[in-house]
Image (cartoon, rainbow, N blue to C red):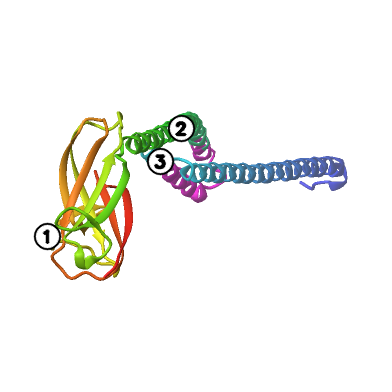
């Protein structure tokens, strides 16, 4: 049987046209789908990058808070959470952008980390507030202590001044002082060659502030060459934190009223002419002095 292609030409043209249309549709569909998939891939990459940036930001936040926290327990927790952030960052870096399930899990982990960080921020703020209150309280206590110390120091200084005034007021004073040389008959002499004793007489003045009781009175007689007359090198008393020689010593009973005192020094040594000086001491104080001249 012989086929007449001229009769079939319209049918063939229709079939070919249909195939062209179908092919065009398929090509358009594939191009569109490929474009959509490319856009989705790009979106996945962008979302992953955004997530990486957020992880980096929260990691830096943890790092910053570590330097502002002085509480050891809270610092330990922050370090643990930061280590977890770094681990999740590494997991994210190794995850394909198209792995939506893993990306979602890591995004959820990030949300949890944010909540934990907010709770730590609240604790840090509370601790900082408490520290500020403690510092303010400590400063207040320190200022109060300093004020009290200054007050106590002022009171102590005033007490010392008052004590010095009382001590000064209670100090004995020698008046009517006379020092001279006499012979064996008690007559005053101006020449050493005729003298057998030095006589020092004075009056302890009235002082109702002074405590009554026994008083030890010392007299030092200084020669013209600056030496102190003394019968023994052991005859010493304390004056201004030093042990010094004395010539004569006497115990008197003092009741606050004036009393006369006379003390004698037997001349047994060679003495040079010149000016002699008698210094009188009592209760560790120098209470009077008198100078007198002697000829050879």
Give whichever of 276, 90 is nearer the camera.
Answer: 276
Q: Position of residue 259 (x, y in %)?
A: 24, 36
The residue that mark 2 highlights is: 147
Q: Name the N-terminal-most of marks 1 and 2.
A: 2
**In contact (CB < 8 Å): disc 1 and disc 2:** no
Q: Name the N-terminal-most of marks 3 and 1.
A: 3
Q: Name the N-terminal-most of marks 2 and 3.
A: 3
Quadrant where the image shows the C terminus:
bottom left
| Neighbour tally class for label 2: few under 14, some 14-19, many 20 plus, Cα within 10 Å | few
Give whichever of 294, 38 is nearer the camera.
Answer: 294
| Neighbour tally class for label 3: few under 14, some 14-19, many 20 plus, Cα within 10 Å | some
**Can the viewer see residue 273 in this picture?**
yes
What number is the disc on residue 234?
1
Give whichever of 238, 69 is nearer the camera.
Answer: 238
Does residue 84 belong to the magenta stretch? yes
Residue drawn at 16 percent across, 61 percent down: 196
The residue that mark 3 highlights is: 75
Q: Which residues are magenta?
A: 82-106
| Secondary structure at numbered mark 1 | loop
Residue drawn at 26 percent across, 30 percent down: 257
């Amino acid at each position: 049987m012989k086929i007449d292609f001229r009769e079939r030409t319209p049918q063939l043209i229709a079939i070919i046209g249909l195939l062209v249309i179908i092919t065009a549709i398929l090509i358009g569909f594939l191009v569109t789908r490929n474009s959509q998939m490319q856009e989705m891939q790009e979106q996945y990459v962008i979302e992953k990058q955004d997530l990486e940036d957020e992880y980096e930001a929260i990691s830096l936040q943890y790092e910053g808070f570590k330097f502002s926290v002085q509480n050891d327990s809270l610092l330990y927790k922050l370090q643990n959470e930061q280590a977890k952030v770094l681990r999740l960052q590494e997991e994210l870096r190794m995850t394909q952008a198209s792995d939506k399930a893993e990306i979602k899990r890591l995004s959820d982990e990030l949300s949890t980390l944010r909540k934990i960080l907010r709770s730590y921020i609240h604790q840090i703020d509370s601790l900082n507030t408490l520290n500020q209150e403690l510092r303010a309280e400590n400063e207040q206590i320190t200022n109060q202590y300093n004020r009290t110390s200054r007050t106590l120091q002022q009171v102590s200084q005033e007490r010392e001044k008052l004590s010095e005034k009382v001590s000064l007021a209670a100090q004995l004073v020698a008046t009517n002082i006379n020092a001279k040389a006499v012979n064996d008959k008690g007559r005053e002499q101006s020449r050493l060659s005729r003298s057998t004793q030095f006589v020092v007489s004075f009056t302890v003045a009235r002082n109702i502030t002074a405590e009554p009781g026994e008083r030890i009175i010392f007299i030092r007689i200084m020669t013209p060459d600056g030496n102190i007359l003394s019968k023994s090198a052991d005859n010493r008393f304390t004056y201004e934190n030093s042990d010094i020689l004395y010539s004569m010593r006497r115990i008197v009973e003092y009741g606050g009223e004036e009393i006369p005192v006379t003390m004698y020094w037997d001349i047994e040594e060679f003495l040079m002419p010149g000016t002699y000086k008698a210094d009188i001491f009592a209760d560790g104080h120098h209470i009077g002095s008198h100078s007198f001249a002697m000829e050879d």
